[in-house]
Amino acid sequence: MGDDFAHPEFLVSTEWLAARLGEPGLRVIDCTVHLDPRPEGGNAVRSGRADFEAAHIPGADFIELGTEVSDPAARYYFMVPPAVQFADAMAKHGIGDDTRVVAYATANHWWATRLWWLLRVFGHDRVAVLDGGLQKWRAEGRAIETGPARPAPPARFRFRPPRLEMIAAKADVRKAIGDSQVCTINALRPEQHTGAGGAHYGRPGHIAGSVNVPALQMADPATNQFKPPAELREILGDALAKPEVITYCGGGIAASSVALVLTMLGHPNVRLYDASLSEWARDPDLPMETG
């Protein structure tokens, strides 16, 4: 068990994808976003569409994570959208109930893991993340396309209510403070966790009682690939020993990387705090710590 993923189906290799490009029923999606830190805290959101049009995997499509599949009425960026909005967006991009989706990014891998998480929230488990992303694909000299995506034939994506057991709200996180049965993980960088530097979201530091497992630790910086299962199991050993895990970050993006890994390692009860520090840090009544 220590040398294998319990759910390897959520990760595919560049070799696997290259052998299947163009197959009916397969949709490859780039969902890159860039976050530009603001001096006053938080980040400015910038679409990765220009990156996509400069270079993408042949036949891939591009989904705007920040608009197409985020709630436009929410106070914070990237919140889970209404089910009808999500289903319409998937159908428009040619993703139906039986479509196999492979998500990738040209920047940090957690944009791809966010789409993986969203699809599963809305009941679509036929989704995987491309291990190594476009970085590995290009390093191997594989084919690249440029320009806008070709329109996809519309599909039927069945409307499903969100799986609430995958989503943590502020009240759940507050209740978890001091609960020995719950491990709350901050997926931000170490300097953000301690409050020593990096972007913050109103107050520096981390949710009281939470531990730091940076999303950056999930992947090998040299290859952009996820680390081997045994190594990831060692990094997340404390969390795997708890009956419940809640992951968070600044806005629910990097946290999806740790959620993916925990799920692949077989943890049955992982929730993502969707609003994360974008909500928590702005409320002075909610406890935070530094150091």
Image (cartoon, rainbow, N blue to C red):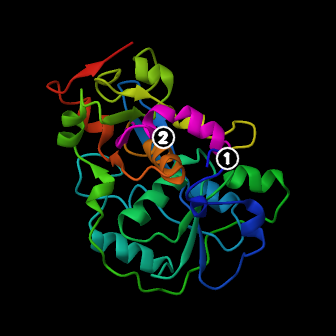
Asked if residue 290 shows in the view, the reply is yes
Camera-nearest residue between 150 and 116? 116
* x then y, percent, for residue 136: 75, 51
User: Which marked residue is nearer to the observer: mark 1 or mark 2?
Assistant: 1
* Residue lying at 69% horizontally and 58% vertically, measured from the top left: 54
- In this figure, which residue is indicated by the disc labeled 2? 35
Amino acid under disc 2: Leu
Task: Give the SS element for disc 2.
Answer: strand
Residue 180 to residue 110: above or below = above
Camera-nearest residue between 257 and 271? 271
* x then y, percent, for residue 4: 65, 51
Considering the image in quadrants, where does the C terminus appear?
Answer: top left
Reply yes or no: does residue 247 show up in magenta: yes
Q: Which residues are magenta?
A: 226-249
Crowding near the residue tagged with mark 1, few <14, some 14–19, many ≥20 C-alpha atoms within 10 Å: few
| Disc 1 + disc 2, Cβ < 8 Å | no
Reply yes or no: does residue 160 show up in magenta: no
Q: Residue furthest right?
A: 141
**Sequence-first tag of 1 and 2:** 1
* x then y, percent, for residue 107: 61, 46
* Residue lying at 67% horizontally and 54% vertically, measured from the top left: 131
Camera-nearest residue between 61 and 128? 128
Residue 239 to residue 145: above or below = above
Asked if residue 145 shows in the view, the reply is no
Residue 50 to residue 177: above or below = below
- In this figure, which residue is indicated by the disc labeled 1? 3
* Residue lying at 48% horizontally and 52% vertically, measured from the top left: 263
Amino acid under disc 1: Asp
